[in-house]
Image (cartoon, helix red, strand yellow):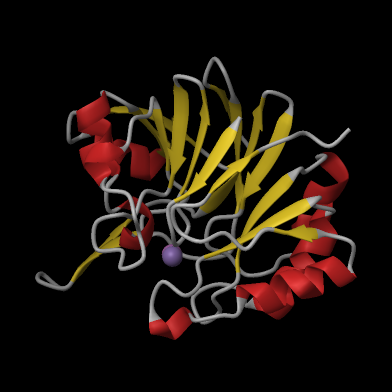
Amino acid sequence: MNLVFHGHSCIQLADGERSIIIDPFLSGNPVAKAKAEDIQVQYILLTHGHSDHTADAEAIARANDATIVATYELATYYSWKGLKTIGMNIGGTVDLGFARAKLVHAFHSSSFISDDSQSIIYAGMPGGFIMDWNGITLYHAGDTSLFGDMKMFGELYDIDYAVLPIGDILTMGPEDALIAAKWLQAKNVIPVHHSTFPGIAQNAAAFTAQLKEQGIEGLALQPGDQLTLVAAS
Ligand code: NI
Ligand code: MN
């Protein structure tokens, strides 16, 4: 099983022909290597509505006849565009046939903001996903602060890979993400949501060095990097 980091918070998981993309933000992403038209997936998982997580959701869904999986409000928004959707809410798990995804809470906001009309459309609660695929448990935290229930996730799930934001300002920064990694008891941590723009520049190598001191493997991926995922025994 394979993971590709597309920059910002966008990761793609694949096992042969089966593939899922989370938070597609390629168009307008200054660090992305892939283009939306290159992406082949069956499912698009969205943690929340902000454009740096949803920019290419519609285009990828149309090109692939793929299904968008998101909170009920966000899924409804895309269903109005004629796309296939699965609407969920916090605490629910969806069986995608080859993988399961549980929508868990995150502390953030979720909306579509139009500067032109100075309007904000509510997009439901923000969330994260705990995925189970081929015996590998991967937690994508979405955009969030540190929160105490990450301890609970660590107790309830055997997290092989945690994808955590470290950019600060809009999400938790590296200090809180280090605490999150410990609370989650994650075996591997992939720092994301940093260095896409100057305002969220971070030193991912320094972060992974701090993780290592805690006995946690940190994987500071560059946009376009691929990783073979393995379940810890
Ligand atoms: Ni956001
Ligand atoms: Mn974001």
Relative side of 85 to 6, left or right: left
At a point 28% along the width and 53% down the height, the residue shown is 55
At a point 32% along the width and 49% down the height, the residue shown is 34
Relative side of 72 to 206, left or right: left
**Is 127 drawn above or below residue 107 in the view shown?**
above
- The answer to whether one can see residue 146 in this image is yes
Relative side of 152 to 208, left or right: right
Image location of residue 25, percent across then percent down = 34, 55
**Is 175 drawn above or below residue 214 in the view shown?**
below
Quarter of the image containing the C terminus?
top right
At a point 26% along the width and 44% down the height, the residue shown is 36
At a point 41% along the width and 59% down the height, the residue shown is 110
Q: Quadrant of residue 64?
A: top left
Which is nearer the eye, 15 or 110?
Answer: 15
Which is nearer the eye, 91 or 145?
Answer: 145
Image location of residue 220, percent across then percent down = 62, 63
Image location of residue 179, percent across then percent down = 79, 70
